[in-house]
Image: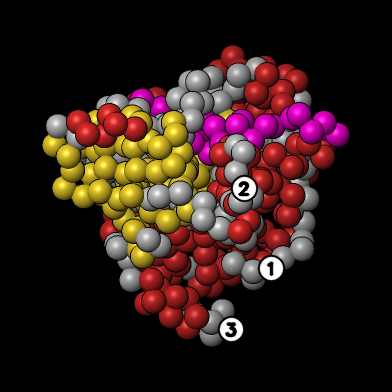
């Protein structure tokens, strides 16, 4: 069979239900879809226009970042070591008001896209208050997959505008548009009601920050006599198409509501640790089979877009928080960054694993490194040893967008030069 691309490597991790490990395996791609996953001599049945022999490498699905703000890359390291409220209201919101415009979104967004490609992320779920139509152009140029949401706190960026944008991008292979009301503490009730209406009428996904800090929950209880989850449920906003970022301060009733309504969650361990927001009840969510993916959050609160750090942070955070080393295994963390992330975005039939018929989003990790030798278990290395800089090749939608760490779709030097030149003092 003639295909377009074959990727070979020492260990193929398809992230199928069995979490199998295929030794000396390969993945074949025809147009934008996976047409074969196999091992050894089977490869003789396939010819391809391009063959990437990754050698001593792990071949796996591209990583999925379930919660970020890509345009915030230029705010990396701007304000650190502060609690969320001080950080957000006294540093980030003022900086955004001062600097963010179309050019900012394009350049800073390109920096995030570059960083994501170079650390193995192939799909991301984004929220921002401005300019997602400009970011969409950058994402398409980068060749990444993304769901872009507007957080509805900017005049002009209304629910109607989001609906209009979503129609514009309906048939786009890489970019989808979502409703992304920032949170219950930023969006007024009438905006949230409109979101609920539009989500149902237009079949759009909803992406919202929920119960990130103790303060958010306490303020909401004081103002409305309800937790943010109870309040959102009263508004009818909790549904299978809703993804709640953070979800740190959930009580048992909140968790039950998530389960009953089919809500998905994006867990952001590094951001939650850095802002000292708290440890999400991940073990309980997993026990209830609530789909949970991983998110980096924006570069101002993490400060990278590297999902390898997120996998490790997730595993370590919950072991420490529960004083139980068996909590969040390496396999669980890799699932969260791949197939479970796809479930969180409602895309598990398209992406998140290397299976025939799925869209070809594939990465390879070079194992020929001192910190990755010897190797007893690929999952263990991915979570406890590897970093984004070990990613060697990246394929999205069947297209090779990074080969031997050379990004083919974006001008890396130009993006870095522009980032260097950007000076917040001016
Ligand atoms: Zn966020």
Q: Determine if residue 187 is in view.
A: no
Residue on which disc 2 sits? 374
Q: Give me the residue at 67% from left, 51% from top.
A: 271
Q: Which mark is residue 425?
A: 3
Q: Are marks 3 and 1 in contact (CB under 8 Å)?
A: no
Q: CA distance from mark 3 to mark 1?
A: 14 Å
Which residue of the protein is positioned furthest toward the top in this rendering?
260
Residue 79 numbered tag: 1
Residue 407: name its quadrant. bottom left
Position of 157 with respect to 232 (left or right) is: left
Q: Residue at x 77, y 63 (%)?
A: 81
Comes first in the chain, label 3 or label 2 = 2
Please state the horizontal and vertical placement of residue 284, each as a whole percent of the image: 72, 23
Distance between mark 1 and mark 2 Cα atoms = 39 Å
Label 2 CB less than 8 angstroms from ligand 1? no
Q: Is residue 286 visible?
A: yes
User: Closer to us: mark 3 or mark 2?
Assistant: 2
Horizontally, is 144 left or right of 335 in the view?
left
In what element is the residue under mark 3? Answer: loop
Task: Quadrant for the C terminus, please.
Answer: bottom right
Residue visible at 74% across and 54% down? Answer: 275
Q: Position of residue 8 (x, y in %)?
A: 34, 43
Query: Which residue is most to the front?
Result: 41
Point out the stretch of residues depicted in magenta.
Answer: 322-351
Q: Mark number for residue 236? A: none
Circle 3 crowding by C-alpha within 10 Å: few under 14, some 14–19, many from 20: few
The x, y position of residue 221, in whole percent, is 76, 33
């Amino acid at each position: 069979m003639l295909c377009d691309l074959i990727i070979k490597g020492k260990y193929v991790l398809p992230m199928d239900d069995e979490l199998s490990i295929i030794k000396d395996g390969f993945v074949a791609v025809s147009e934008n879809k996976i047409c074969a996953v196999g091992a050894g001599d089977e490869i003789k049945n396939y010819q391809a226009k391009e063959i990437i022999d990754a050698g001593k490498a792990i071949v796996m699905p591209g990583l999925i970042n379930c919660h970020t703000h890509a345009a915030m890359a230029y705010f990396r390291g701007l304000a650190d070591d502060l609690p969320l409220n001080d950080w957000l209201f006294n540093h980030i919101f003022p900086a955004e008001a001062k600097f963010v415009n179309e050019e900012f979104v394009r350049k800073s967004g390109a920096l995030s896209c570059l960083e994501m490609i170079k650390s193995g992320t192939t799909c991301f779920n984004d929220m921002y208050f401005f300019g997602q139509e400009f970011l969409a152009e950058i994402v398409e140029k980068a060749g990444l997959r993304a769901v872009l949401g507007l957080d509805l706190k900017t005049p002009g960026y209304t629910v109607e505008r989001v609906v209009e944008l979503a129609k514009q991008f309906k048939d786009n292979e890489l970019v989808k548009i979502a409703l992304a009301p920032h949170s219950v503490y930023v969006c007024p009730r009438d905006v949230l009601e409109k979101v609920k209406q539009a989500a149902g009428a237009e079949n759009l996904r909803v992406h919202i920050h929920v119960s990130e800090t103790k303060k958010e929950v306490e303020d909401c209880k004081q103002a409305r006599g309800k937790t943010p989850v109870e309040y959102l449920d009263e508004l009818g906003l909790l549904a299978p198409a809703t993804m709640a970022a953070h979800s740190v301060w959930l009580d048992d009733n909140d968790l039950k509501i998530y389960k009953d309504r089919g809500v998905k969650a994006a867990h952001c361990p590094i951001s939650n640790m850095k802002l000292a927001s708290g440890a999400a009840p991940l073990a309980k969510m997993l026990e209830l089979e609530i789909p949970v993916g991983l998110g980096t959050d924006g570069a101002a609160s993490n400060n990278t877009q590297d999902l390898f750090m997120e996998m490790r942070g997730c595993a370590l955070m919950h072991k420490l928080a529960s004083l139980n080393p068996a909590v969040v295994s390496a396999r669980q963390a890799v699932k969260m960054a791949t197939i479970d992330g796809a479930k969180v975005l409602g895309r598990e039939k398209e992406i998140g694993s290397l299976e025939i018929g799925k869209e070809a989003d594939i990465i390879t990790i070079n194992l020929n490194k001192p910190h990755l030798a010897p190797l007893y278990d690929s999952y263990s290395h991915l979570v406890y040893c590897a970093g984004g800089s070990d990613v060697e090749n990246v394929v999205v939608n069947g297209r090779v967008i990074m080969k031997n760490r050379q990004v083919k779709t974006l001008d890396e030097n130009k993006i870095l030069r522009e980032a260097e030149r950007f000076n917040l003092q001016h």
